[in-house]
Image: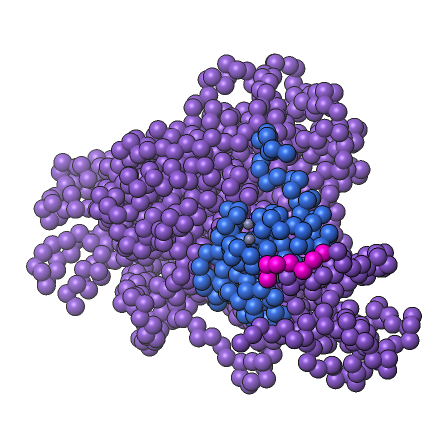
Chain colours: A blue, B purple
Amino acid sequence: MECEAERPPLGVFKCQLCALTAPYSYVGQKPPDTQSIVLLEESYVMKDPFTPDKGRFLVLGSRCSLCSRLVCVGPECSLFYSKRFCLPCVRENLDAFPREIQQDVERRKGPSKKPVGQPGSGT
Amino acid sequence: MPPPRAKDGRDDRGRPCDPREEEAPGKWDWNCPETRRLFEDAFFRDEDYIRRGSEECEKFWTFFERLQRFQNLRSPGKGDRDPGRPKHSIPALAGLPRTYDPCHRINLSVLGPDTWGPRGLGRPPPGRVAEFRQALQHYLDFGQRQAFGRLARLQQERAALPIARYGARVLQALKEHQVVVVAGDTGCGKSTQVPQYLLAAGFSHVACTQPRRIACISLAKRVSFESLSQYGARGYQIRFESTRTAATKVVFLTVGLLLRQIQREPSLPQYQVLIVDEVHERHLHNDFLLGVLRRLLPQRPDLKVVLMSATINISLFSSYFDGAPVVQVPGRLFPITVVYQPQEAEPPASKSEKLDPRPFLRVLEAIDKKYPPEERGDLLVFLSGMAEISAVLEAAQAYARHTQRWVVLPLHSALSVADQDKVFDVAPPGVRKCILSTNIAETSVTIDGIRFVVDSGKVKEMGYDPQAKLQRLQEFWISQASAEQRKGRAGRTGPGVCFRLYAESDYDAFAPYPVPEIRRVALDSLVLQMKSMSVGDPRTFPFIEPPPPASLETAILYLRDQGALDSSEALTPIGSLLAQLPVDVVIGKMLILGSVFHLVEPVLTVAAALSVQSPFTRSAQGKPDSAAARRPLDSDHGDPFTLFNVFNAWVQVKSKRSRSSRKWCRHRGIEEHRLYEMANVRRQFKELLEDHGLLARARAPQPGDSHSRLQQRRERRALYQLKRQHEEGGGRGRKVLRLQDDPGGCSSEEDPGAGDSVDIQDVKFKLRHSLDQLQAAATAAQDLTRDQVALLKLVLGRGLYPQLAVPDPFNSSRKDSDQIFHTQSKQGTVPHPTSIFASSPEVLHVQEQEAGGTEGSRGNKDKMSSRHQLLTFVSLLETNKAYLVNCVRIPALQSLLLFSRSLDTNGDCSRLVADGWLELQLEDSESAVRLLAASVRLRARWESALDRQLARQARRRPEVDQEEEEDPGTRKEVADLSRELLKFTASKSDTDLYSDCLRTFWTCPHCGLHAPLTPLERISHENTCPEAPQDGPPGAEEAAPTPLRKASVLQKPYHCEACGKDFLFTPTELLRHRRQHV
Ligand SMILES: [Zn+2]
Ligand SMILES: [Zn+2]
């Protein structure tokens, strides 16, 4: 097999809202090995594990610009609207966001992450 | 430094456009190739995230088109302001864009381009650039979402595995104990998860053994994928390749490889934790490893061991390791209904011994009747062997054609890889798969979607007859444990049904567990390994379950026969070399001998060919076309030479027009995959010989000028790219099976356009091997001189000795199909149907015209001839007949004179008995004596050439890469020896292989006894004759390894001047003794 000079992981990213953990190899706005892309927030980045192409990255998450919680980019934990916001913060300040975002967040409330068959999600 | 965001796409949008650059309405066309190229040149350069011409680039344009259609649909309502919202008091919220636009939700931005292409088309209108940039951002964002979704899903799946809840328990148990048993059935996730739990807990030198090579690769890939490389590199190490690096924290390796590591460093200092997976399969070397570990544990109190097993006989393992704690993981099985359908004694369908398919068809009918076709769920049928599979296949396919509700597929290990893969394809709606399988589907192959299982209750396994040293394929009832495994296959994806074609009382009578391999197979390699690891007498080794003493004795005897052990059962030099080579003893001997005679390249190919499954496809066996197409490659020297020709011809095809090699193989009924395997094994053997100093390491050939170097690098880069593209494409996807409409036709499309698709095997082959080197070897093979071929045969013959078969005297008057051969232990064997000697037996017949030369004293019946030949074979396989597999013909007299362990002659050398079972009569006793004397001389010289080679090898070892050139003396010695061996084998002396009776009248010179005796009887008389003089040195009786040897006629009394003692020596022994005093 060809040698793989992989960038060593800097640490393990852990979302403070869900259990997702993954090793990251870069934090910042300018992912390595890519010249023409900038990230609009300080992001935790890993090499995209689903392609052998070394230059491809995957943004794992970043800090909420309101509460500074480290959250993943998963739709159940955070959203990006010119800045990163964790979902709890968005819900608290829902009126600060445009209608489209509000509707979107309402929709997200519906499907709970809890496994099927757990009654009483409290609606 | 502030983050670079000046060229944000958003800025373009609000700015009034320069009318000069605005194109006339309706004229802009994104589909125009020129336009696209302009943008690609600017945005998709080699250093950019997406590269021009890549698959990704195509995907982008597809996305782009979709996005445009979507935006056209909803463009009117865009940009409505939300003026009612007050500016927020929290600063972070105050700056949010007031107007909603989906692009605000993208957390990345694309810069550039710095320049617009050199094509002179100039800069496109900024509006279009912005449009493009936005689309690209959307595309990248979409890719991020997709990849992140996969990542999250992967973690959810891991958390949902049954083992996930037990990880902490395993770690806790391992804290308190040195050995822990993890028991859980296939699918509970133990093989992939336990290594990761250990790494997450901070262990860093983890080895995980697997019984199969293929599992090492797939597990290493899976674990690295799941753990997202967070534990540094992980790797696997198997016979052919290693991806291990210094940073490797977990390595997957075969049991055999771990044992060899223990051989080198008995305390295994390189590992902290050892996971031994699939211990319940009870493979030979796995059982041995457990024994070795049990001894090692007290010396390595810091070493942790995890045994992983299916839920079979767990207490056996736990108690073997002092009551090690067991963590049992419940499987994820749905309920399965068991239906016992014992086969009543019914009138046989036909007179043949073929399996009656009717009970199996009844199950198919019952399923059709009871379950509507919309309810999906496939059927898996367990049969004992290939013959049984084809019997049921035929009947089931007829039924399937009639009902159009089934696709019937066979599954067994002799099938081509492509055909095996078909069982993973999906059936069209309303149709079920019916997979007819051997026990390969019990644990090795997991097929999803099985709802019904039919269990015949039978299995065919290699049984081993230690007396006959014969591998025998026999049918057995399965064990209860296997029956449960088979049943379990029906409940992996939903509730299932298992039809057992035997009675419940039969089940109760089954043995609880399968017979472990150590009780079924030949133990040669195990004993050799045990000897080289100095674990003491194999007879007293504390195995988890001891092997039958008779198999142990046979193995020890065999190794002595092969010269790997001496008379005190200690390793000989060649034996210790053989123990280091992870190959069969016979193959190892060939490789060593080949290296002595400078025949390494051809011997490598032959040894590799004999180490993999036959490349001739089963289905092609009956096809006269394939056989005819292959005929030019047939060699009448024997099957290994045919394989040699096939491989070389294939390499030539590959190097000339590699795309067509697949077709070339198909046309000749050759499974190309086996040839790739051969190439891998060959390379591995070559590296072994290099590692052990038997072959000078080849320096990488440097192409002369920089131009060709550049060319070569470019080619390799292109190959890597092809490989990467293939991997991105995910390899072979699931196909939809077709109903069989043509009788006997197979399902799944034969891709007729395969010609232009990438042959990934070909790509990998070229990356792994130097085609130039292989081709050079193949070309050299074409030019092998007759002498070299004869030498090669000698090497094979000596390697394979004493695996000999003698043709039956009446073969020449028999039909081709009735040719029989006798081995020392087995009468009436036949060459395997694929053998050249099955299709052209006449090459073995003694030409009659020879007889004319001799004064007609003995008559034609005895057939004095110098053309008598023997078959030497690689293995003996017993199914319905005893088959000789991979045969080579060798000249009888010369081979026996050169190879036999003992030779007995009468006074004038007109009769010779080799190893107590093959007798030769020689016409001309004058020349016979000369031949005998010559053979004795040659044997001694051969022996010393071999000794020298072994000594050279022993000196060269520890990895010092000193390029010790073979000294000219040795070179000349080998050349002389080769020449004389050839002269010897070409010598003509008329012999008769078939004298009526070995008994001849004989008078004992000491006691005067006169009786008809066989040579053996005579020898045993001589040993015990009360009148015989006691002229040997005292204790010689004990020192001689066997009475047969001691009394061999070749031994002569010898008085050594140097040590002043009397000996009884064969000429070889004499030479050896003399050398001591030099
Ligand atoms: Zn999260
Ligand atoms: Zn927050």
**Where B445 sits versus B127, above or below?**
above
Would residue B328 appear left or right of B7 to someone viewing this image? left
Q: Which residues are magenta?
A: B85-92
Q: Position of residue B443 (x, y in %)?
A: 51, 36
Closer-to-camera residue (B334/B1068): B334
**Where B593 sits versus B433, above or below?**
below
Q: Quadrant of residue A123?
A: top right
Would residue B262 appear left or right of B1073 to someone viewing this image? right
Residue in the picture at 37% in, 48% down:
B201
Closer-to-camera residue (B337/B475): B337
Residue in the picture at 48% in, 56% down:
A13
Residue in the picture at 51% in, 26% down:
B484
Query: How would you classify the magenta stretch by its main secondary structure?
Result: loop
Queried whether the magenta region covers residue B296, the answer comes back as no
Closer-to-camera residue (B934/B853): B934
Q: Quadrant of residue B109?
A: bottom right
Q: Position of residue B892 (x, y in %)?
A: 43, 51
Residue in the picture at 65% in, 50% down:
A94
